[in-house]
Structures are given as C-alpha cells and as structure tokens.
C-alpha cells in the first residue's frame, strides 16, 4: 500500500513538472516561466556596475532564492523519471544543471564572475515550458534546404568575390591613396562592405566617378542579398511540402511526457510511448 502511494506521488509530481494538461501543470509552467525571466533580468542587472554597487545585497539575495528554487526543481525532475541518468545527460538536463551550479561554485571558490553568464542559459528553458521543441523540426528543414543549395550558393558567392575584387581594383585605380584607398585589399574590403549594405563609413569615395561606381555597387548589393534567399526559399518550400504529408502537425501533438525516455511527441489519443513503448499517463 505504501509502495502504491509512493508510485502515485511520483506520477502526480511527474505530471505537474513534465506535462501541462492539468491546472497544476499549467500553473507550474507559468510560475517557472516567471522565475526564469526574473533570473535573466537579475543577470543583466548584475552586469551593470552602477546598479550592482548600489543593490548588490538585494540582487545577491534574490539570486540565491532563485538558485534554490531551481535546485529543488532539478532534484524533483531527477526523482520523478524512471531513468534519472537519461534526464541528467539530456540536452535540457545539462542546461538545467549548468544554469543552476554557477552560484554554488562562486560561493565555494569566490569571485568567479565569469560563470554568471552561464545563468543566462536559463532562457533556453523557455523552449521546454512553451513546448517549442516540437516546432524545432522546421529548423531541420532549413538545414536540409541549405545543404541542398550549397552548390548553387557556393558558385554564387564565388562570383560575388570575383566582382568584389574587380570593383575594388577599379576603385583603387580611380580613388588612389589620397582618398583612403591605400591598397587593393583595402579597396576590396570597401567593396564588400558596400555590397552587403553595411557601410561602416571608414572609407568613402571622393571623386565623381568613384561615387557613381559606389552607387552602382550599392544597388547591386540589394540584388546580391536577394539571390541566395530565393535559392534557399525554393529548396525549403520543396522539402517542406514533402515532409508535411508524412509528419503530424503540431496541433495533433499534446504535452504527454514519457516517464521512461522523456519523449514528448505523442498524439492526443496515444496510450503508449512512440519511442520506448512505455504506458502513458493518459
């Protein structure tokens, strides 16, 4: 009987922490989201010397409170899964640990402020809370599109480099050293900066002919930006149309999380885990 109560307690805590189908689970995610945002704001405020000097004790106390809350949450996540090591070594498990331990390390060894930046990793946990991980599949389509377009883009970039060298050389001959174009590499640098519409302004043509060529380079820059975008977009649209017929939509997925393998991509009517076959808490 005691063992059954223990299992029920673990399952209830698992539902609250890992899932958002219940009121308790939704409330937990909302509170956790607020704490994450507050902790990131604290990290940013601590980096401002004037604020840190004036409110150091307050910021330090709040950071300790948030760190303790994250520690309790991390321990709860570990004890509510059947394979704790799988969670600990998972992506989010590592992020949870790295974003929690900096305060303890700085307390034990003192003055290790560089570790404070690791606390900003807590912002990555928003992906899990908002269940954004299921939408990251779109990034795989983008990577596939980039990979499929690499030959076309490589040829295009090679052509752009040739154009930049030719125009840079021409500008070196037209403007000369007296106008800042001291050598061909620096002139090519100016051309690349102008083509990409960055325009640092450290070098500028002074002669009418040089300014005319610069105007042409600026207009050409807009076209150059559009070409690789069109190539990747076409490949992305093609790969997305193929995958959409085989993959379930995000609306067909809920927040059920498997206690055994932590898989979350399950349909609404799923009774068993699609990864390991474990029975779900439907």
Image (cartoon, helix red, strand yellow):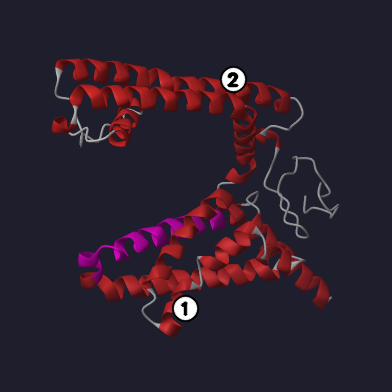
- Whole-percent x and y of residue 158? 49, 27
**Dot placed on the residue nearer the N-terminal end, 2 or 1:** 1
Rendering quarter of residue 196: top left
Secondary structure under the numbered disc 2 in the rendered image? helix
Viewed as shown, does residue 197 lie left or right of 159?
left
Viewed as shown, does residue 161 lie left or right of 258?
left
Circle on res. 145? none
For residue 128, above or below residue 44: above
Q: Report the front residue among 239 and 215.
A: 215
Residue sitting at 56 percent across and 72 percent down? 72
For residue 217, above or below residue 115: above
- Whole-percent x and y of residue 5? 78, 72
Circle on res. 234? 2
Rendering quarter of residue 56: bottom left
Q: Crowding at label 2, few (<14), some or many (≥20) Cα neighbours within 10 Å?
A: some
Residue sitting at 72 percent across and 44 percent down? 265
Magenta region: which residues? 27-52
- Whole-percent x and y of residue 81? 73, 65
Q: Report the front residue among 198 and 50.
A: 198
Secondary structure under the numbered disc 1 in the rendered image? helix
Viewed as shown, does residue 261 lie left or right of 180?
right
Looking at the image, the residue that sits furthest to the bottom is 108
Q: Report the front residue among 83 and 145.
A: 145
Give how far apart the Cα atoms at labels 2 and 1 are. Answer: 49 Å
Residue sitting at 25 percent across and 27 percent down? 172
What residue is shown with label 1?
A: 105
Is 45 covered by the magenta stretch? yes
Q: Crowding at label 1, few (<14), some or many (≥20) Cα neighbours within 10 Å?
A: few
Viewed as shown, does residue 64 lie left or right of 81?
left
Q: Main secondary structure of the magenta part?
A: helix
């Amino acid at each position: 009987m005691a063992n059954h109560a223990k299992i029920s307690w673990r399952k209830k805590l698992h539902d609250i922490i890992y899932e958002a189908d219940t009121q308790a689970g939704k409330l937990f995610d909302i509170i956790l989201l607020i704490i994450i945002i507050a902790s990131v704001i604290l990290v940013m405020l601590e980096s401002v010397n004037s604020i840190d000097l004036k409110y150091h004790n307050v910021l330090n106390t709040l950071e300790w409170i948030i760190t303790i809350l994250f520690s309790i949450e991390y321990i709860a996540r570990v004890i509510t899964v059947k394979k704790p090591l799988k969670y600990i070594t998972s992506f989010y498990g590592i992020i949870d640990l790295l974003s929690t331990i900096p305060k303890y390390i700085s307390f034990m060894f003192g003055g290790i402020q560089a570790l404070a930046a690791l606390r900003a990793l807590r912002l990555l946990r928003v992906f899990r809370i908002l269940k954004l991980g299921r939408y990251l599949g779109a990034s795989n389509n983008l990577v596939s599109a980039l990979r499929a377009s690499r030959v076309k883009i490589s040829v295009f970039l090679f052509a752009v480099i040739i154009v930049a060298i030719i125009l840079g050389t021409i500008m070196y001959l037209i403007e000369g050293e007296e106008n800042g174009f001291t050598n061909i590499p620096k002139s090519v640098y100016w051309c690349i900066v102008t083509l990409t519409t960055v325009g640092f302004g450290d070098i500028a043509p002074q002669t009418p002919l040089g300014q005319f060529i610069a105007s042409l380079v600026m207009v050409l820059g807009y076209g150059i930006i559009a070409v690789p975008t069109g190539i990747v977009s076409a490949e992305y649209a093609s790969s997305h149309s193929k995958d959409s017929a085989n993959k379930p939509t995000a609306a067909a997925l809920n927040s059920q999380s498997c206690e055994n393998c932590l898989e979350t991509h399950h349909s609404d009517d799923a009774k068993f885990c699609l990864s390991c076959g474990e029975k779900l808490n439907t």
